[in-house]
Amino acid sequence: MNSYGPHWYAAVMGTGIVAIALSAPPVTLPGAASAATVFWLLDLALLAVVALVGWRAWRAARRTGGPLLGHLHDPVLAHSYGAVAMGLMTAGAATGAVGGRWLGGGALAIEVVLWVAGTVIGLVTALVVPYCAITLHDVRADSAFGGWLMPVVPPMVSAATGTVLLGHLPAGEARATVFVLLCAGFGIALVATFLILPAVWQRVLRHGAGEARTVPTLWIVLGPLGQSITAAHHLTVAAPVALPGQDPDLLRAVFLVFALPVCGFALLWLALAAALTVRQLRAGLPFAPTWWSFTFPIGTMVTGTTALATATDLRLFAGLATVLLVGLLAAWTVVAAATLRAVRAARRTRPARDNPRARLVGSLP
């Protein structure tokens, strides 16, 4: 098991997206609202635990004189810093979608704080992590993997979740400015995704799926694809509110022209990733934190296909979103259970408590 690192925010992402998906399911599901509340509360608890352990790790690095962001030097873990930003924003969006019934106006305040923090961190990772990859990492022909998308996708999450906040801004310059910035964030992540995807595709074709623990990262590719559909839908719906005078019918047509081909490719990649995962399962797929890659990306496909169902009113997309939601719940259950087993095993075998490093490593597997 690995020691603490930013990759553990993927558990926050994967749990929060379940709460979001259940808060507005594609079809009526008995008990969905109650289940969404449970996942939301669990997500906030996970965020608190992971953030607390991260703060302890940062304090330990300060005391020992080690690098405060040491994972930036790791050519694999450096990319997982994007999970910090997305974890914060996903927890914020889940609070906005579910927590209003319990917290009233406090839910909006939490959502805004987490969205702002996640957006700022996400913009930093989108710049700093590629810079480190260029200047510090040894990047070979077979180095590309789905995790390369992690640091550049957060601006897309900002765009998808930030549109909810537009209605709380004063009409005019302020609202229009934020809307334009959300569109820019959408563009940052979309273009970066289109640059990285060919490298991942070529790596898989020429060098295979990679070692067992990296196979789940193939599912990360679904994240920016599904999230781009969700963000595009939210932005086109919000455009007439932020920039009065826009034609809703034209915006809907633009959304469909973009979203339908992206959804088609995403389903192709989902089938390919599933086939490669089944192949690896037959050979053995030991648990690793990368298993959380099975959750958030599928969740974005749920929200993306739900958006298409809303825009087209077709049962095809409502049915597809429902199937994906069932898959998301199954994936989360399996990964969460495996994580709990790994945590228990790590606690039984960790070194003595009087070792400072053991206390840090033992905080999370």
Image (cartoon, rainbow, N blue to C red):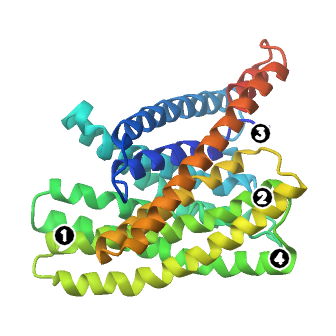
Q: Amino acid at mark 1?
A: Ala
Question: Which residue was labeled with disc 3?
Answer: 2
Q: Earlier in the sequence, mark 1 or mark 4?
A: 4
**Between discs 1 and 2, the one toward the N terminus:** 1
Q: Quadrant of the N terminus?
A: top right
Residue at 51% in and 43% down: 15
Question: How far apart in space, not on screen, are marks 1 and 2 (Cα)?
Answer: 41 Å
**Callout 2: SS:** helix
Residue highlighted by disc 4: 141
Q: Secondary structure at mark 1?
A: helix
Question: In what element is the residue under mark 3?
Answer: loop
Give the labeled residue for mark 2.
214
Name which of mark 2 and mark 3 comes first in the sequence.
3
Question: Residue 39 placed where, x, y %?
Answer: 45, 38
Decide which of tag 3 and tag 1 comes sooner along the chain: 3
**Residue depicted at x 35% and y 75%:** 314
Depth check, mark 2 against mark 4: the one in front is: 2
Q: Which residue is mark 1?
A: 176
Q: Nearer the viewer, residue 208 or 60?
A: 208
